[in-house]
Each structure stands twice: as C-alpha cells, then as structure tokens.
Image: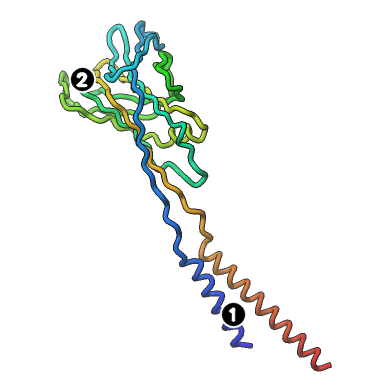
Amino acid sequence: MKNLYHTIAFASVCTALGFALGASPEAKAATITLVGNGYSAADYNRDGLGDFSHDSLDNLLEIGEFAEFRALYEFNIANLSLTSNTIITQAVLQVRANPITVRHRYFWAELFGYRGNGEADASDFEAGIYLRKYIPDVTTTNSQSSQSQIFTYYVAPFISELINNKDAFAGFGIRATNSLGKANLTEARLIIETADVAEPVPEPTTIFGSAIALGVAGWLKRKKKIKYDKIVSAQ
C-alpha cells in the first residue's frame, strides 16, 4: 500500500511539472506603417473656428497676427480590426518639419486627436482632445533650423480606443502654442506595433495542487475498495 501511495504521488508531481514546464507560445509581433493625408486649416478672424482648409504637402504651423494655421493629418485605420488576443504595444505619430523658425525658445507644437472622416474639413481646425506636445530642437531666439526635424508623438491609448470603437479614420491636429515660432510640416507616418498575446496559462501552484488532489482522491478510492474487498472475503 505504501508503494502504491508513493507511485501516485510521484505521478502527480510529474504531471504538475509537465504542465508547469511546458513551452508557452511566444507572442507574435507585427509593425504597421500608415501614411497620412495631410492638409492645412486656417482661422482668418481669430475666433477659434476653422474658416478654410485645403490639401497640402507643406502645412503651415503658425499663429500670426491676423490668422492662425494648423496642420492636420488623417489615417485610414478601417482595416486594422484586431482579434481578441491582439493588443497595441506602441503607436507613434511622426511628422517631418522643415524649416522651423523661432522668436523665442518657449515654442512647442501640441497634438490633438479626433475621429476623422477622410475629408479636409475646415471644422477639423478646432476638433480633437489634447494628447501630447513636442518641443522643437531650436533653443535660441531669432534662429531658423535649416535641417529637417521629426516631431514624434506617442499615441497608443488614443489609437486603441478608435480601433475598439471601429472608427475608420484617426485624425490628428498639430497646433502652435503661441506666436513665438512657426514651422512647415510635411509628410506624416503612423507606426503601430501589435502583439498577439498567448492564452493565459494556469499557475504552476494551481496545476500542482490539482494534480495532487486527483492523485490522493484516486488513492483513497483504491484504499476504500481494498478494505471493502477484505470485508466481503471475510464473510
């Protein structure tokens, strides 16, 4: 009987270790790069509402004395429906700027996100919620950067929300924070990184406990049967 118990216990431990040490499938990663449709929107009477918009490869970012110009981009995300175990690990918006002129070092570009429709609407001028800001790499006054720069914004939570809501377009508006500088923004890219998360694996301790419980239950059942057989034989 003692040997039987040892055999059951050993088998239970082996079963638990077999589950615990089994190779888990690795998460599959993918990178998706989207090119945005860029356009410029303007507020000519400085009332905070867009009066004009047009498609442009060179979008002005400036708060002037009589008008404000904002750069806008929309990305088609309609085909990015994700499976239940796929998550967005990172999403980055990159916009090239060349040149940048500043009259004071306290100048930066704020990013706003909105649900787009693929059209260059003047109302997109004021659309969106604040996401992030980028500080251009120009730190002296009355200077111009002749080299192009990349404005970089991390927008994973915003993109995840749009995809979960099955929205077709992700819209971004870039605004100057003040009249201390201006920039010409060109092409924009939205880089999305995803990963397929493996199905949850039971904790080793849970598997071990379950295996032991099954083993002990089997042993008790066997022991009870042997005892019953002895009683019947004695009669």
Q: Position of residue 191 (x, y in %)?
A: 35, 36
Query: What kind of residue is marked 2?
Result: Val
Position of residue 32 relative to residue 132, above or below, is below
- Which colouring convention does the figure follow? rainbow
- Residue 218 left/right relative to 125: right
**In the current view of this chain or complex, which residue is farthest to the bottom?**
234
In front: mark 2 or mark 1?
Answer: 1
Instruction: Tell me if label 2 and label 1 are in contact, CB under 8 Å.
Output: no
The residue nearer to you, when weighing 77 against 114, is: 77
The residue nearer to you, when weighing 17 against 83, is: 83
Q: Position of residue 106 (x, y in %)?
A: 25, 23
Query: What kind of residue is marked 1?
Result: Ile
- The total of numbered circles placed on residues is 2
Q: Residue at x 61, y 75 (%)?
A: 215
- Residue 134 left/right relative to 116: left
Q: Earlier in the sequence, mark 2 or mark 1?
A: 1
Q: Please identify the quarter of the rendering in which residue 124 is found.
A: top left
Q: Residue at x 42, y 52 (%)?
A: 27
Which image quadrant: the C terminus? bottom right
Q: CA distance from mark 2 to mark 1?
A: 78 Å
Q: Residues within 10 Å of mark 2 (few under 14, many from 20)?
A: many
Q: Residue at x 43, y 36 (%)?
A: 157
The residue nearer to you, when weighing 222 against 142, is: 222
Secondary structure type for disc 2: strand
Secondary structure type for disc 1: helix
Q: Position of residue 127 (x, y in %)?
A: 43, 19
Mark 1, residue position? 8
In the drawing, what numbered circle is on residue 102? 2
Position of residue 182 relative to residue 198, above or below, is above
Q: Position of residue 136 (x, y in %)?
A: 24, 27
Which image quadrant: the N terminus? bottom right
